[in-house]
């Protein structure tokens, strides 16, 4: 006998209209309600309504330590948009979950009895979560590269290439002194950006003694601001600051503004990320722009293929960054 929407609504404790919206992937439904209804529907064996999605498969997009929240994190909200817009076409229901703890991972955050595949990203990735992912037997696609999870299929920003582009832009503008402000270098994202950056400098015989590296505990706005307030000493030479995230660059710019240091007249700044706020601040930040939406789309297609049993979808994909020119670097030096 076919299970009705009314039976699902009674078991789940929600209205029939809510059940209908969940089964049609309506984005207005909360994640907790969606998870509850899908779990009941799956347990009862209810078929998905024709014209909504083509299978009963449920996946989850899980983010470790987003910037404040997934919605306010411009990078991972872009990834999420790509995933959600692609999942319906691939016949998938998508749940979204995040965690803020930097020390431990609670396994109850991922309902393994419900989801059949995962898309996972975040900086930093707790060791406990890495061990959990390694123990899972369901298809998983990573957004980014993580130590210990190298065997997983993944979609990545080409951070080495991005760092190289940043170095080229500073060299083109003939800066004589460079300060690099970065997040923890043990994190592969930042290590790769620095690898590409120094590769570009080396290829152009730029003197290593003219480069200073400041490693921060995190990559937030406050870390960039703190550097300027506590450690920055203005040089008589043409100087630029390369920040490995746009948030660091934003903090640097705010501190310089408060101190009356002109950008780019007295010091140049370049960021990394291409976040929306870089177009709104003044002067507009020159940055290395990423494409998180495309990362999400590719990851979803890869996961869909893996769920269908296509092992050819296992692999590593890199998405090319590009230079987004703003107003924070000064050319025309003589």
Image: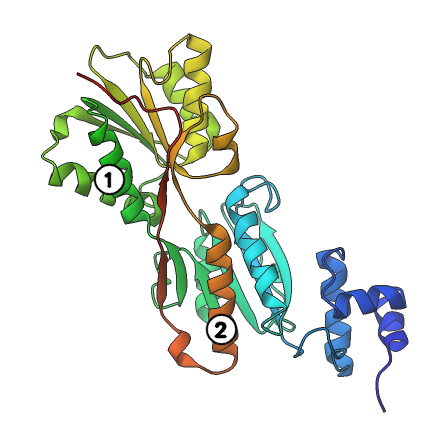
Residue 112 to residue 318: above or below: below
Task: Classify mark 1: residues with Cα within 10 Å, few (<14), some (14-19) or many (20+).
Answer: many
Label disc, if present, on residue 131 of the rendered structure:
none
Q: Residue at x 23, y 36 (%)?
A: 168
How far across and down, in percent of the image, does residue 233 sit?
A: 29, 12
**Which residue, as the protein is rendered here, is positioned at the far left?**
205
Give the Cα separation between the discs numbered 2 and 1. Answer: 34 Å
Instruction: Decide which of 121, 293 is in the foreground and name it.
Output: 293
Relative horizontal placement of residue 269, taking residue 106 as reference (left or right): left
Name the one closer to the observer, 118 or 294: 294
Q: Where is residue 153, by image quadrant?
A: bottom left
Q: Residue at x 59, y 52 (%)?
A: 98
Q: Judging from the image, what secondary structure is the residue with disc 1 in?
A: helix
- Is residue 138 visible in the rendered image? The answer is no
Quadrant for the N terminus in the image: bottom right
Label 2 SS? loop
Residue at label 2?
139
Pick whichever of labels 2 and 1 is earlier in the sequence. 2
* Residue situated in front as seen by the camera: 244 or 185: 244
Q: Nearer the viewer, mark 2 or mark 1?
A: 1
In the depicted structure, whether residue 2 falls above or below residue 141:
below
Residue that badge 1 annotates: 197
- Spot occupied by residue 152 in the image (x, y as percentages of width and height): 39, 67
Pointer 2 local density, CA inside 10 Å: few below 14, some 14–19, many at least 20: many
């Amino acid at each position: 006998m076919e299970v009705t929407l009314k039976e699902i609504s009674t078991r789940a404790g929600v209205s029939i209209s809510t059940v209908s919206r969940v089964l049609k992937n309506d984005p207005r439904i909360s994640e907790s309600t969606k998870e509850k209804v899908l779990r009941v529907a799956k347990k009862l064996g209810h078929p998905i309504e024709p014209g909504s999605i083509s299978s009963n498969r449920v996946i989850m997009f899980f983010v470790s330590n987003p910037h404040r929240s997934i919605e306010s994190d411009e990078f991972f909200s872009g990834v999420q948009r790509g995933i959600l817009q692609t999942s319906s076409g691939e016949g998938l229901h998508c749940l979204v979950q995040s965690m803020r703890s930097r020390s431990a991972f609670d396994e109850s955050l991922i309902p393994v009895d419900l989801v059949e595949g995962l898309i996972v990203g975040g900086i930093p990735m707790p060791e406990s979560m890495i061990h959990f992912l390694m123990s899972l037997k369901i298809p998983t696609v990573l957004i980014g590269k993580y130590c210990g999870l190298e065997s997983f299929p993944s979609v990545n920003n080409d951070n080495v290439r991005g760092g190289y582009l940043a170095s080229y832009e500073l060299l083109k503008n003939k800066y004589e002194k460079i300060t690099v402000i970065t997040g923890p270098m043990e994190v592969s994202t930042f290590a790769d950006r620095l690898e590409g950056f120094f590769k570009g400098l080396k290829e152009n015989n730029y003197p290593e003694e003219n480069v200073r590296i400041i490693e921060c505990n995190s990559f937030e706005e406050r870390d960039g601001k703190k550097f300027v307030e506590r450690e920055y000493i203005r040089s008589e030479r043409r100087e630029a600051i390369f920040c490995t995230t746009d948030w660091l660059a934003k903090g640097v710019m705010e501190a310089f503004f408060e101190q009356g240091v002109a950008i780019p007249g007295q010091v140049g700044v370049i960021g990394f990320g291409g976040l929306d706020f870089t177009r709104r601040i003044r002067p507009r930040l020159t940055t290395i722009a990423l494409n998180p939406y495309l990362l999400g789309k590719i990851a979803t297609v890869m996961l869909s293929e893996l769920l269908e049993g296509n092992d050819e979808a296992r692999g590593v994909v890199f998405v090319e960054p590009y230079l987004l020119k703003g107003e924070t670097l000064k050319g025309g030096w003589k």
